[in-house]
Image (tube, rainbow, N blue to C red):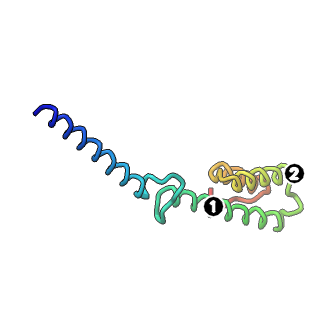
Amino acid sequence: MSNRLIVGAVAAAVLLQVSIGAFAATSSHGAVGKRRMGDHLTTVYNNDVRDCTMLDSEFYQAAGGPQGATVSADAESLHQQGAKLCDAGAGEAGTLKESQAIHAAGATPRLY
């Protein structure tokens, strides 16, 4: 009787593990790299992209405005670094560099 009980318990445990594994394989929550609409990481990434784009545009407006002749090499260097960081996916660091570039160009960024 105890052998049947042990075999039954082992079979139940194996079936439970198989069903959990099958559920995890078909579940989208366990998928690495897949982002769903409205997901927190997607929202953060989209905000970083928007901020990078907006600050890039602001830099070019500042460079082409009345202060355009006074845009220093430092401002241009900061802008290039920020654009490189934004393109690489480091949006927060990129927006900080872009905002420093706008300050160095003699304008005030609207984002920060």
Crowding at dot 1, Cα within 10 Å, few <14 / some 14-19 / many 20+, comes out as some
Q: Quadrant of the N terminus?
A: top left
Crowding at dot 2, Cα within 10 Å, few <14 / some 14-19 / many 20+, comes out as few
Residue 24's x, y, as percent? 39, 52
Residue at screen point 73% across, 52% down? 82
Looking at the rendered structure, the secondary structure element under dot 2 is helix
Q: Is residue 83 left or right of residue 37?
A: right
Q: Nearer the viewer, residue 16 or 37?
A: 16
Q: Nearer the viewer, residue 61 or 77?
A: 77
Q: Tell which tag, 1 or 2, sits nearer the viewer.
A: 1
Q: Quadrant of the C terminus?
A: bottom right
Residue 6's x, y, as percent? 19, 34
Q: Quadrant of residue 14?
A: top left
Question: Mark 2 and mark 1 in contact (Cβ < 8 Å)?
Answer: no
Give the residue type at disc 1.
Val
Residue 11's x, y, as percent? 24, 42
Give the residue type at disc 2.
Ala
Q: CA distance from mark 1 to mark 2?
A: 25 Å
Q: Nearer the viewer, residue 22 or 61?
A: 22
Residue 45's x, y, as percent? 57, 58
Looking at the rendered structure, the secondary structure element under dot 1 is helix
Q: Is residue 10 left or right of residue 89?
A: left
Q: Which mark is residue 73?
A: 2
Residue at screen point 33% across, 48% down? 18
Residue at screen point 32% across, 45% down? 17
Q: Earlier in the sequence, mark 1 or mark 2?
A: 1
Residue for badge 1: 49
